[in-house]
Image: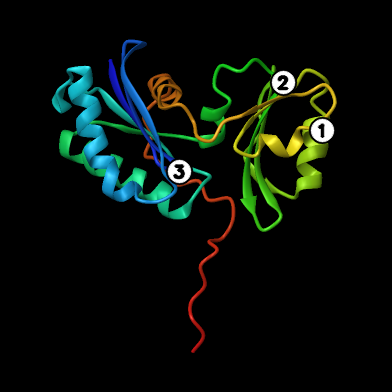
Amino acid sequence: MIVLALDTCLTACSAAVVADGAVRAARSEPMARGHQERIAVLVQEILAEAGVAPAALGRIGVTIGPGSFTGLRVGLAFAKGLGAALDRPVIGVGVLEALAFEIKPPAAAVIDARRDQLYLQTFTAAGPSDPAAVAPDAARAAIAGLGEGVTIVGPGAGLFNDMPGAHVAPREAPDPVAVARLAAARAPAPPRPLYLRAPDARLPAA
């Protein structure tokens, strides 16, 4: 099965093509804004580099958050539109699980959500926690509870450089290859955006 994976949730615009587990093409471009203008062209370039026609795709994987409200909607809308045009399933993948992909537990994926909050998901041998928006102190307590040897990954990992016994691995955005492999492994289901809090935007005062 050939999977096209997309990510526009954080500070990169990324795509990958993975065929039966083998990486055919992958690219991640640092980008704080402009995902909407770049994603379609990037997908065309990645498919051409992989030598894969759109009709040959078996499914499309896309990150669903948490992350930028605008960014995640850009990727999700594009993936849904492409999936509808090709009549292919679109599989949603959480950003935090993609950040921690193939990291041996115990692990924690962390994104700085601003407004004195972090997006956090922890991973143990028993399985992952639910992703959540938590205060920094609560995140620190949850990570400390995983014990020594924990790996902390993600764009918010650097906030825990002082944590004893932890391995800190800052990563600004998930690897699109990880998104593809996670999407390949799960049953198709309609993707929904993962919002862990209300948007920062407010309506103007009357």
Q: Is residue 131 left or right of residue 106?
A: left
**Rendered view: 130 above or below 137:** above
Q: How was the colour assigned to the protein in this rendering?
A: rainbow
Q: Position of residue 189 (x, y in %)?
A: 38, 34
Q: Position of residue 164 (x, y in %)?
A: 85, 26
Q: Earlier in the sequence, mark 3 or mark 1?
A: 3
Q: Name the residue tied to disc 1.
A: 162
Q: Callout 1 environment at 10 Å: few (<14), some (14 to 19), or many (20+)?
A: few
Please tell me in which quadrant of the rendered image residue 44 appears. Answer: top left
Q: Residue at x 48, y 76 (%)?
A: 203
Mark toward the viewer: 1 or 2: 1
Q: Name the residue tied to disc 2.
A: 106
Q: Is residue 194 left or right of residue 26?
A: right
CA separation in Å, label 3 and label 1: 27 Å
Q: Earlier in the sequence, mark 3 or mark 2?
A: 3
Q: Earlier in the sequence, mark 1 or mark 2?
A: 2
Q: Position of residue 45 (x, y in %)?
A: 21, 30
> Mark 1 belongs to which amino acid?
Asp
Q: Secondary structure at mark 1?
A: loop
**Rendered view: 194 above or below 3:** below
Q: Residue at x 67, y 58 (%)?
A: 115
Q: Name the residue tied to disc 3.
A: 9
